[in-house]
Image (tube, rainbow, N blue to C red):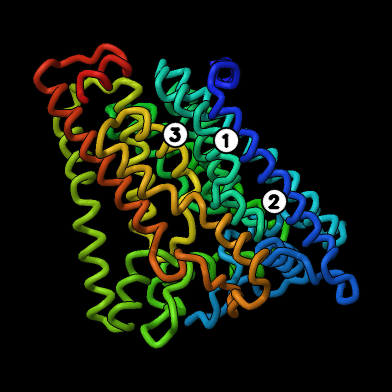
Amino acid sequence: MLWTSIRQFWAEKRWYRIILSAASAYALLRLLLHVLLIAGAFSPAQTTETTFLPDDLRIYLDAAQAVQNQQPLYPPLPLERMEFYQYAPSFALAFTPFLAFSSITNALIHTLLHVVTYGLLYVVWGRIFAGLHMDSAVRTQALLLPAWLIYSPFWSDLNYLNVYVLMALMASLLIQVILTQKLGWSVILLTVILQIKPQWAFAALLPLIIGQYRFFFRQIGLSAAAYAACTLVTIVLIGSDYGLGQYATYFNLLVGIGGNYPWRTPDLAFLGYNHSIVQTVVYLFNVSPESLRLALVIKSLIVLPLALFGLLTLVRPARVFNGYMKLLLVFSLYTAAFIWLDVVWELTLSIAVFTLLAAIHRGWLRSLIWVIFVPYMLVDAIQVMSYVIFGDSVLAPGPYVLTDPSIYLPLTLITTVVFYGLLTMRLWASFDWQKQRNTLHGSEHFSRTTH
């Protein structure tokens, strides 16, 4: 249905052909620029084996090398820098096969993997919307194909060769298999996600809130057992003393990162790319116990409506959740999870959230959604065009692009909070409507009746 809609819009809408062609041309040129950069085409005289290795890929490879050499994976607390290995030892072990390749070969391989992963992400969300019979969301996603091609979080992730797009795909697949109650796949996906970025396991709470208790507890129990098994196998493979020590340090890092992070303070020229509530409060009021408590209060107040909704559904479980409400709930969990984090660099899955919100809202709310999302979507294009026009003069150590609005304003945080607010408001409105009628008849019908 997604590809049918794309072909239909291409055949019928001239403006769509123009915008999609322009976005495709930009994407191809942007990808070519990335490949030329990692190949060292712009400074061949200075090219070395590691000169153009993207930072996060370098961190993963360094961690894999550290595992082989029985060296520490994690920096001591308090942290002195923001760029460090943050995942479980099992992820570093899984990365060791890539040590057989050169730096440039690794960069090219992972570039290809990122592009394929992002394409799969687009396809998966087309299938999720279609599987829930949300025809308007499918059509909206088809119309937004140009936006997917210039979407800043994808290109930013490609710049560093991080795993954000991979995590977005795995979380999306987890949502899909939970919606269809495929327990085995949900356990596999949840186990892998927990090895890398545990916050991306937000969808695991969906069955609990919608009353699928048997599925929820079986999923959690089996995933916990699988996680323990992965941990045990990793410890055996890398050595018991070394493995136990690294896992202890890893869990200590997860628990203590908020109190030991190298926060950007008011004496610095701009906020930077960590758009968490804690970082924003600290940048305004400096690091102190009072500012950290203030950030905790703000986070708690923001997530309180979703917590109350979840509590209400647990107390009164005899409620009907159609596909539309399940997506509202799972996206609310996603944005709430990222609001709660102390370190927030991206909101990669926001383009799927944007697709749903743009499909169901009308009037000034739809305009608000576009006003909030478009600057976030265009950050990479702004960075690239600024560098093309002004060269190195727009770069600052970090690296930061001085014309980038997201280093002065927390665009990621603004997008997250606004989307969370819209989602939770619709969720509460949906629950009240259900309470009066006790049933729902299809996501499209419900969407129309709540406009």
Residue 142 appears anywhere in the view: yes
Element type where label 2 sits in the image: helix
Quadrant of the drawing holding the N terminus: top right
Give the farthest residue toward the left.
436
Where residue 188 sits, quadrant-wise, is: top right
Q: Position of residue 338 (x, y in %)?
A: 39, 54
Mark 2 = which residue?
30
Q: Residue at x 47, y 41 (%)?
A: 351
Residues packed near mark 1 inside 10 Å, few (<14), some (14 to 19) or many (20 plus)? some
Mark 3 = which residue?
219
- Say whether residue 36 is left or right of residue 431: right
| Label 2 vs 1, first from the N-terminus | 1
- Say whether residue 401 is left or right of residue 440: right
Give the farthest residue toward the top.
441
Quadrant of the drawing holding the C terminus: top left
Hey, what amino acid is under mark 2?
A: Arg
Depth check, front residue: 233 or 362 = 362
* Mark nearer the viewer, 2 or 3: 2
| Label 1 vs 3, first from the N-terminus | 1
Hey, what amino acid is under mark 1?
A: Ile
Q: Position of residue 227 (x, y in %)?
A: 54, 47
Give the farthest residue toward the bottom.
267
Residue 254 appears anywhere in the view: no
Mark 1 = which residue?
19
> Is residue 78 depicted above or below 26 in this figure?
below
Residues packed near mark 3 inside 10 Å, few (<14), some (14 to 19) or many (20 plus)? many
- Say whether residue 18 is left or right of residue 93: left
Q: Position of residue 314 (x, y in %)?
A: 20, 34
| Label 2 vs 3, first from the N-terminus | 2
Hey, what amino acid is under mark 3?
A: Gln
